[in-house]
Image (tube, helix red, strand yellow):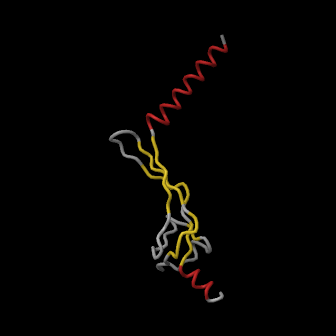
Amino acid sequence: MALGGIETIDRLALRLEFAFMVEVTSSDMSLLSETSRAEFDKSKMTNEFGDDNASTPGSRDKVAGTTEVGVRKSVHRGPGKCGRIEVLLKPKVVLEKDVAGSEDGG
């Protein structure tokens, strides 16, 4: 009798997982990168070679290029329902000021 109960629970758990993953929520993954000359925004990207908090308040540091791509997940909650976008991993970038500093030998 106990084995039959475990099989029932297992079957119901699989049905619940299917309903949650396929019927209720679907998602798309995409890669994130930043274009050169984009303004650095620490909420959207990570500074590869420097401290994200080292920027002078009000400064507008520019991105030189992306060194590592990020990952974004778009979650849809079924037909006609609003979804959301989650950034799972921010892209890593190098800033123009860091590249200029290394070219100057510093």
Image position of 75 (left or right of 48):
left
Label total for image = 0
Front one among 72 and 43: 72
Image quarter in which the N terminus is found: top right
Q: Residue at (55%, 70%) from the top-left corner? A: 93
Q: Residue furthest left?
A: 80
Image quarter in which the C terminus is found: bottom right
Q: Residue at (44%, 36%) from the top-left corner? A: 24
Q: Position of residue 98 (x, y in %)?
A: 58, 80
Query: As displayed, is residue 57 above or below residue 66?
Result: below
Query: As displayed, is residue 8 above or below residue 45?
Result: above
Q: Position of residue 59 (x, y in %)?
A: 48, 80
Q: Residue furthest top?
A: 1
Front one among 58 and 65: 65
Q: Position of residue 95 (x, y in %)?
A: 54, 76
The quadrant in which residue 66 appears is bottom right
Q: Position of residue 28 (x, y in %)?
A: 46, 48
Q: Residue at (62%, 89%) from the top-left corner? A: 104
Front one among 80 and 70: 70
Q: Residue at (49%, 72%) from the top-left corner? A: 40
